[in-house]
Image: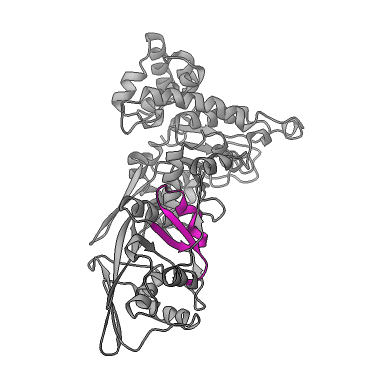
């Protein structure tokens, strides 16, 4: 007897339907074909134990199991339940009272028949709905995540016996129902980290507000204990709330990586990723023998924070250059190519010197010019060229640290940022790949950042007197455009240019050039 059961494989952030064909013939043997990896090849042991512990068995017949398309590599343990149901129905141990071709069935089996969570439930559910499947049977831990897809019945199960009873005795499964919009707005909560807790640092708060309003990458330079990490952690709290579309995109990536939460089926908070400086280039941008999204993709629609930037391997930092420009990363292998989105804000921090102190005669440790040059050369010019805002962070004096008054809350700053982002959205509505000021190219800069003669003279004078590099020119105009948006001004004037010039510390003579 030949039986077909349907599962799914995830490549990148998209799913492909897999047909598992089970054929029973005379003889003895268990043959699994169709390019399965080791985890799938080992599934016969898990399936045999799970069936035995639930009153069934793998019969002593010749079983040929084909995973189609046969030239597509399959990986992971999520096909255990798919294969087990195919074996049970093909060997006529249970009846098929519900048509198998109406359902996608996925799940990893424990030896007692209970189900373990799988990766990629959301993209699988989206593909199942697109291809007209009636339902999706999967582990209960993934049910809320899959149920946010409308037009697909999602059944979260705990044991294989529930699926057997559903097909064999028509005992109904409990459907998981999620109101997507209600779920989305319910979990939009107050941020864990709030700018109201930050003492002093008013100029840095202003700088972070500008970065959030225009989507600008930013680097914070300051001695140990000046508050760089504390400020960076609070940046997501002033970014505009995610739209439903952004939330779905982000959830999809985290679903593929197996990082979604059981309680909330959809991600509503912008991600904040802070990898350690020992991270490899593959872990940062994604990849591996069987590609998985890296930190830059997990930070999609959120913030990637690189603390102590010069401590990262230079090769690791260099691989970020293309994703910072293109907002996605493509990983190519001999048999396939996958693309992961990676539209994130880069926030980096660094000490001004190896000792942590720069031009401070009272510092406990001093660094020689050679040590300074070696330290600063770890960060390349092309990478800095992709960072719009450089700001120096100074230690907070005792008077401000001991002040009991709370600062301006993140919610108030977020309102101003959201208004500025709305202006940019309307401005770039006709452009496909530009949504906020940081994404502007040369053509858009010339169109939307026109300067009057007085502002142009100010910029020229500043570049000459402060020894600003040529790469600072466009960055200053972009940041000035964002400052003008925060002020509600249609054109960029000298005030905006003057403030933007302050945010190019590393372009000044004495740092990198």
Q: Can residue 46 be seen in this view?
A: yes
Residue at x-position 54% and y-position 56%: 262
Above-or-below relation of 38 to 397: below
The answer to whether residue 435 is magenta is no
Above-or-below relation of 129 to 68: above
Provide residue 244's location: percent of width, then percent of height.
46, 39
Residue at x-position 49% and y-position 31%: 211
Q: Residue furthest top?
A: 453
Provide residue 344's location: percent of width, then percent of height.
43, 41
Residue at x-position 23% and y-position 68%: 70
User: Dividing the image into 4 quarters, which one contains the C terminus?
Assistant: top left
User: Dividing the image into 4 quarters, which one contains the N terminus?
Assistant: bottom left
Above-or-below relation of 488 to 507: above
Residue at x-position 24% and y-position 65%: 69
Residue 128, image quadrant: bottom left
What span is colored magenta in the figure? 135-160
Provide residue 305's location: percent of width, then percent of height.
50, 45
Q: Is residue 41 visible?
A: no
Pick whichever, 83 or 376, lies toward us: 83
């Amino acid at each position: 007897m030949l039986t077909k059961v349907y599962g799914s494989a995830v490549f990148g952030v998209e799913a492909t339907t897999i047909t598992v064909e089970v054929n029973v013939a005379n003889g003895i043997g268990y043959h699994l074909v169709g390019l399965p990896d080791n985890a799938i090849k080992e599934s016969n042991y898990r399936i045999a134990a799970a069936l035995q512990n639930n009153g069934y068995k793998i019969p002593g017949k010749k079983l040929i199991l084909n995973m189609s398309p046969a030239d597509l590599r399959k990986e992971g343990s999520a096909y255990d339940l798919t294969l087990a149901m195919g074996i049970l129905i093909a060997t006529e141990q249970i009846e098929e009272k519900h048509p198998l071709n109406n359902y996608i069935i996925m799940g990893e089996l424990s030896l007692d028949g209970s189900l373990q969570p799988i990766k990629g439930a959301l993209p699988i559910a989206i593909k199942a709905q697109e291809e007209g499947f009636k339902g999706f049977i999967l582990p209960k831990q993934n049910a809320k995540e899959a149920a946010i897809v409308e037009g697909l019945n999602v059944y979260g199960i705990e044991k294989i016996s529930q699926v057997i009873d559903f097909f064999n005795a028509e005992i109904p499964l409990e459907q998981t129902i999620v109101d997507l919009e209600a779920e989305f707005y319910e979990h939009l909560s107050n941020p864990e980290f709030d700018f109201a807790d930050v003492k002093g640092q008013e100029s840095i708060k202003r700088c972070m507000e500008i970065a959030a309003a225009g989507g600008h990458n930013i680097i914070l330079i300051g001695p140990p204990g000046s508050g760089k990490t504390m400020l960076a952690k609070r940046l997501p709290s002033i970014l505009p709330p995610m739209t439903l579309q952004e939330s779905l995109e982000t959830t999809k990536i985290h679903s593929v990586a197996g990082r979604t939460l059981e309680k909330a089926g959809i991600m509503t908070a912008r991600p904040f990723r802070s990898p350690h400086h020992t991270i490899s280039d593959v872990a940062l941008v994604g990849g591996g023998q069987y590609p998985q999204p890296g930190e830059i993709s997990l930070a999609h629609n959120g913030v990637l924070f690189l603390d102590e930037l010069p401590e990262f391997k230079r090769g690791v930092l260099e691989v970020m250059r293309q994703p910072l420009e293109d907002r996605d990363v493509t990983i190519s292998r001999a048999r396939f190519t996958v693309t992961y989105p990676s539209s994130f804000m880069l926030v980096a921090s660094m000490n001004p010197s190896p000792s942590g102190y720069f031009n401070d005669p009272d510092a406990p440790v001093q660094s020689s010019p050679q040590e300074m040059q070696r330290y600063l050369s770890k960060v390349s010019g092309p990478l800095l060229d992709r960072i719009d805002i450089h700001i120096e962070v100074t230690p907070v004096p005792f008077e401000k640290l001991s002040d009991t008054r709370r600062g301006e809350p993140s919610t108030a700053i977020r309102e101003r940022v959201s208004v500025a982002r709305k202006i940019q959205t309307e401005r770039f509505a006709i452009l496909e790949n530009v949504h906020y000021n940081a994404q502007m190219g040369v053509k858009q800069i010339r169109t939307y950042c026109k300067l009057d003669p007085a502002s142009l003279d100010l910029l020229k004078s500043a570049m000459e007197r402060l020894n600003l590099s040529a790469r600072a020119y466009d960055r200053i105009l972009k940041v000035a455009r964002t400052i003008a948006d925060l002020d509600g001004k249609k054109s960029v004037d000298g005030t905006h240019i003057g403030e933007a010039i302050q945010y190019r510390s590393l372009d000044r003579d004495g740092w990198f050039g």
